Amino acid sequence: MFAKTVPAGGISNKDAETIIGSSVKVEGNFVCEGNIIVDGEVRGKIATNGFLQVGNKALIDAEVKAGNGQISGEIKGNVKISGYLELTSTAKITGDMEFGSISIERGAIINGHCTMNENGGQITPATSLAEAIDEEED
Amino acid sequence: MHIYIYDSALSQKKYLSQVHEVEAKVTDLGLSGRVSRLGKLRSLRDIVREELRRMPKTIIVVGDDSLVSQVISLMGGTGVALGIIPIGEHHQIAASLGITLENACNVLSARRIIEIDLGMVDNQAFVRRAEILGPKIKVLIDGNYSIVAPNTKLEVVNFLLESEAEVGMAKSDAQSGSLYLMITKEKNSFLKKELERSLVPFRELDIQSDAAEVVLDGLTKVNHPCRITIMPNGLQIIVGRERNF
């Protein structure tokens, strides 16, 4: 459903196939087919062809693959989003990112390389993006 | 042949007129059959096993949610269709299948049959939900990943009733081909109590705890359960037009 269109402001619980609340810890190969909301902890690997929404208190120590995504929490690991990736101001990503298109809100922290997969060209190194955001804030 | 299983509570005076009304309508519609009444001397398990040996066309439960759940758990995988005539205090299962006391006989006559999934705890079936009880429960989902959720309520849900729909499960119907692990955490704030719910669809769930128990549909307790699985299309059931799924 969300593979083609990306909802503004994320998805609601009703649109999610899988919801990981803040009191839940997941470990292993977390592979799903539909939309996922993560507000808890995940270690290992996350993969879905749907929409991945990471809440601002979520902690993910995993390789992440999804169709589209909105990230507000912390991810330690490489992130591969085939469609649109939205990073909100509370997002913190330590790892390389690959995506079709992206929007980054002021305040998001990125430590890694960014690659835009649609044209195959590597855009700006992520560290520079983060620095650019910091400079803009200053 | 139709087999009618009557709840023992139906012998109470307050239900007599409803039972007579149903019996008259059943006769009018040409749906008469053999009647088995639950009593103190025969267990439901014995009755259902005995009736299934007669190769009936339909087993019809005349009673409440509790009896419906128990009969369903005994009929999984038999291929015999189940009908419901809801008489008694609680009949939310029938309601979610579009069956009321008023339309039940006509629903039986129309014989609209669907197949629904059943949940299985080891070898015992459940229709709606199974609660996992015990300290420090760890579950393994589909052999791929484990979940730990301390101080929470863990339930496996096949389908939700209409009254439970606010939970927000998008595909909580009994034909989805998946069971859902529903994890509920109570969060007490100063002014109100809030529930945080997690949902995980699965087909196989292994319970990795020696002290766990599972309560099936709020009725039957299973000690030291190992595995919860789904029996896809495990039950043929007669439903009304106004069903939830």
Image (spheres, rainbow, N blue to C red):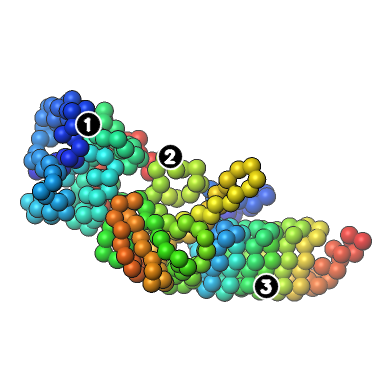
Name the residue at the right extreme: A138
- Mark 3 vs mark 2: same chain? no
Which residue type does callout 1 highlight?
A: Asn
The chain identifier of the residue carrying mark 2 reads B
User: In what quadrant of the picture does the N terminus of chain B appear?
Assistant: top left
B209 displayed left or right of A86:
left
Q: Earlier in the sequence, mark 1 or mark 2?
A: 1
- Residue pointed to by mark 2: B163
Image position of B219 (left or right of B148): left
Instruction: Name the residue located 19 percent from the left edge and 56 percent from the top edge.
Output: B78
Query: Are the residues under badges 1 and 2 in a single subunit?
Result: yes
Based on the displayed image, in which of its 4 quarters is residue B6 positioned?
top left
Q: Which residue is the site of mark 1?
A: B106
- Residue highlighted by disc 3: A76
Using the image, determine if residue B236 lies above or below residue B150. Answer: above
Disc 3 residue type?
Answer: Lys
Q: CA distance from mark 3 to mark 2?
A: 40 Å
Q: Position of residue B211 (x, y in %)?
A: 39, 69
What residue sits 52% from the left and 60% below the top?
A: B151
Quadrant showing the C terminus of chain B: top left
Q: What is the x, y in percent for residue A128?
A: 83, 71
Contact check, label 3 and label 2, Cβ < 8 Å: no
Place residue B5 in its image quadrant: top left
Residue pictured at 90% horizontal, 64% vertical: A135
> Does residue B110 appear in the picture of this structure?
no
The reply to whether callout 1 and callout 3 are in contact (CB within 8 Å) is no
From the viewer's perspective, is residue A65 above or below residue B52? below
**Mark 1 nearby-residue class (10 Å; few <14, some 14–19, many ≥20):** some
Callout 1: chain: B
In this rendering, which labeled residue sits more in front, label 1 or label 3?
3
Residue B69 seen anywhere in this rendered image of the structure: yes
A24 or A97: nearer the eye? A24
